[in-house]
Image: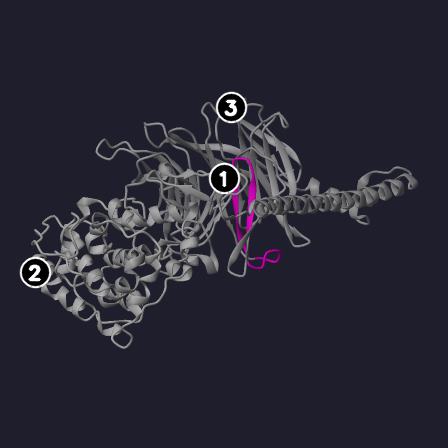
């Protein structure tokens, strides 16, 4: 058998050993049987060279060679001689005479008698033409006859004798996966080609699917592509896993809510928001939405600019309208004066009946004058801490905030004062911190209290018990207000960062609406509900912050905010429902060196809410304290009463006369002023640090 066929069989044996017989069906037709091997050996035995036997490693032969029996050399048939030599080489690595080699003895020494059977069957294919083996003899006849020693060293390379027997091979032989010593049924032999050898090689790896290619390029939580910027930008945790920023933050919140532990969604390692790190990958399949986010920011800026321009335009139109009205009034006055001059310059009374101007002057001269007289000054508590004063006409009750005087219940609360007699009544403990704002729900007999705590409490006035508690995401709530009429169950709250919340007092656990501040984050100091009217058919509510004022107008079950045309910084805001006017108290600043009391009226121009300024009253130059002025409607006039901090005076201003009509000295700081209407007349209550002053409003005609 030639080296080519021996190498092919050895390759097939290795393939079958590697795949443990899994590909017998695929390569079975390529396996060469023993009979074909012996037959080839007979056909090509004369072409073997003795150098192959010399290069054979002695260690690859059978470790227990059989001892040859002495026998006389006899001429043998070439076919039998080749078979005997093959069997002898498998049994004994040393050269032996062909005459001393016996096929039956060799098979008995190897312990496998079945090898003799294919040797006996070898002459069968040569029977029809017995002359064929002899035809192979003329080729070596031209060459010199080999010596006996060289002929003894002729070896037929068999895979079973070329490779050492190992434990794995022994196990494979026992399992009958492949056994080169046992005869196999004759099969059609095929020549190995390059294509076949390539197909019998190591199987190629299957190409990865699209899912495997996309692995690592998308967020494992939402399965969406990462972005280079924005909310879904690429981030990682401390453990090294990658996610979209918005997805992993939402996952950590949900993980803490369900299991009280924040963990990575892939490896379950503990993680916190501080472990989130933004990644800047060189190669990353992500959606670049930088331009989109930039355009969105520019769009928001343009919207704010457009809103500001709209408000400014409305203000300019309002100013233009006021200027036109004033110009018309001046023209009318000019016409009156010219008529008076033409008449000879007589007194005004002469034209009082016929001229509208005389009627106006007459009405101004006949206006009622008002003066304040102190009637009572009583102490509310010995501990300083009074800040807020509020009057409820249906309940005839005046409420003042104060510090608790009871050691068992430290904190703050409110003191009820009887309005007819102005005597202090019972005390109601409300909070542990200073009270900042108070509101009344007269139809539901409820009192709302806002302090520096993170909650607003409501109390029943009749039972003096806490009925509800409202919170807004654990944010400090500084102000509160209650709506009227069809929205009498609505409670408004303002927080420390400029946010506004709307609650339904029947469902305190739910926030109906939330309006976070977008451009100004100053605290909300006052909130006032505006009822429905001719100008605002759906009503709304005013929100006063330290630096700006907004009006939220209801439209289609939602409130649309609009910044009003008034400049701060502000100290307080007071809205009068009967007069439909609002009074602002502004601090002194670089633009306005004196404090201001601004009386205005809500109006709408081209669908935009604006403030129509009625009067601006200048006060003190220094405003170290947050004080609250008030407005009081008397007959057909409006009085504004405020505290001048630098002069320590109580000032009263007549709006119709446009002049300050009275000032009264006050030794203590007046933090809040509240009008009180009783059957006995009109009063004014002024709250100091621990006392309450009651002033009687007297009217007289000139």
Identify the mark nearer the N-term, 2 or 3: 2
> What span is colored magenta in the figure?
533-552
Q: From the image, state whether disc 2 or disc 1 is nearer to you.
A: 2
Residue 451: x percent and y percent?
A: 37, 38
Residue 80 visible? The answer is yes
Residue under the image location 19 percent in, 53 percent down = 161
Q: From the image, state whether disc 2 or disc 3 is nearer to you.
A: 2
Placement of the C terminus among the 4 image quadrants: top right
Question: Which residue carries the number 3 mark?
Answer: 648
Taking depth in this image into account, of 74 and 158 the one nearest to the observer is 74
Residue 489: x percent and y percent?
A: 41, 56
Instruction: Examine the image and state in which quarter residue 69 appears.
Output: bottom left
**Callout 1 secondary element:** loop
Q: Classify mark 2: residues with Cα within 10 Å, few (<14), some (14-19) or many (20+).
A: some
Residue 468: x percent and y percent?
A: 32, 50
Q: Spatial distance from mark 2 to mark 3, Cα to Cα?
A: 134 Å
Residue 392 visible? The answer is no
Q: Classify mark 3: residues with Cα within 10 Å, few (<14), some (14-19) or many (20+).
A: some
Question: Which residue carries the number 1 mark?
Answer: 282
Residue 56: x percent and y percent?
A: 24, 46
């Amino acid at each position: 058998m030639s080296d080519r066929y021996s190498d092919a069989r050895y390759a097939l044996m290795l393939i079958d050993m590697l795949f443990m017989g899994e590909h017998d069906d695929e390569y079975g037709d390529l396996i060469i049987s023993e009979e074909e091997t012996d037959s080839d050996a007979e056909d090509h035995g004369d072409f073997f060279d003795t150098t192959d036997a010399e290069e054979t490693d002695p260690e690859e032969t059978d470790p227990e060679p059989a001892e040859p029996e002495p026998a006389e050399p006899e001429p043998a048939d070439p076919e039998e001689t080749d078979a005997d030599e093959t069997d002898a080489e498998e049994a004994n690595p040393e050269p032996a005479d062909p005459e001393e080699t016996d096929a039956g003895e060799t098979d008995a020494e190897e312990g496998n008698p079945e090898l003799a059977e294919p040797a006996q069957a070898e002459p069968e294919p040569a029977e029809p033409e017995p002359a064929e083996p002899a035809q192979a003899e003329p080729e070596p006849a031209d060459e010199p006859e080999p010596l006996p020693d060289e002929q003894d060293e002729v070896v037929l390379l068999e895979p079973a004798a070329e490779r050492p027997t190992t434990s794995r091979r022994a196990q494979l032989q026992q399992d009958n996966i492949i056994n080169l010593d046992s005869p196999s049924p004759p099969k059609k032999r095929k020549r190995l080609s390059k294509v076949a050898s390539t197909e019998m090689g190591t199987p190629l790896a299957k190409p990865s699917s699209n899912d495997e290619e996309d692995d690592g390029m998308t967020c494992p939580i939402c399965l969406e592509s990462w972005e280079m910027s924005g909310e879904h930008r690429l981030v990682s945790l401390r453990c090294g896993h990658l996610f979209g920023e918005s997805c992993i933050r939402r996952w950590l919140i949900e993980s803490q809510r369900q299991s009280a532990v924040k963990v990575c969604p892939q490896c379950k390692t503990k993680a916190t928001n501080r472990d989130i790190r933004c990644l800047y990958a060189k190669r990353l399949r992500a959606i670049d939405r930088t331009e989109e986010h930039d355009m969105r920011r520019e769009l928001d800026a343009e919207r704010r600019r457009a809103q500001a321009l709209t408000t400014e335009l409305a203000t300019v139109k309002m100013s233009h309208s006021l200027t036109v009205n004033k110009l018309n009034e001046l023209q009318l006055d000019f016409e009156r004066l010219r008529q008076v001059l033409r008449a000879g310059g007589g007194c005004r009374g002469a034209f009082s009946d016929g001229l509208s101007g005389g009627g106006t002057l007459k009405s101004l001269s006949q206006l009622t004058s008002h003066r304040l007289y102190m009637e009572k000054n009583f102490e509310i508590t010995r501990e300083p801490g009074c800040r807020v004063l509020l009057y409820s006409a249906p309940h005839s009750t005046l409420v003042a905030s104060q510090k608790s005087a009871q050691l068992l219940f430290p904190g703050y609360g409110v003191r009820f004062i009887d309005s007819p007699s102005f005597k202090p009544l019972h005390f109601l403990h409300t909070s542990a911190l200073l009270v900042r704002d108070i509101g009344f729900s007269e139809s539901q007999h409820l009192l709302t209290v806002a302090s520096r705590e993170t909650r607003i409490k409501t109390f029943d006035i009749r039972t003096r018990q806490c009925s509800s508690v409202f919170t807004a995401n654990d944010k400090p709530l500084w102000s509160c207000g209650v709506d009227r009429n069809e929205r009498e169950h609505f409670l408004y709250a303002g927080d420390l960062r400029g946010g506004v919340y709307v609650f339904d007092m029947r469902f305190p656990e739910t926030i109906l609406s939330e309006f976070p501040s977008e451009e100004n984050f100053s605290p909300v100091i006052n909130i006032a509900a505006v009822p429905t009217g001719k100008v605002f058919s759906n009503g709304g509510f005013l929100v006063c912050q330290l630096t700006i004022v907004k009006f939220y107008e209801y439209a289609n079950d939602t409130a649309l905010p609009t910044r009003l045309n008034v400049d701060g910084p502000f100290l307080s805001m007071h809205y009068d429902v009967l007069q439909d006017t609002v009074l602002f108290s502004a601090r002194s600043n670089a633009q306005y060196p004196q404090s201001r009391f601004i009386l205005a009226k809500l109006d709408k121009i081209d669908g935009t809410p604006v403030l129509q300024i009625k009067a601006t009253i200048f006060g003190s130059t220094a405003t170290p304290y947050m004080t609250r002025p008030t407005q009081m409607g008397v007959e057909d006039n409006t009085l504004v009463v405020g505290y001048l901090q630098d002069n320590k005076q109580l000032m009263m201003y007549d709006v119709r006369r446009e002049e300050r009509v009275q000032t009264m000295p006050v030794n203590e700081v007046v933090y809040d002023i509240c009008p009180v209407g009783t059957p006995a007349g009109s009063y004014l209550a002024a709250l100091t640090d621990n006392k309450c002053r009651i002033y009687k409003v007297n009217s007289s005609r000139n």
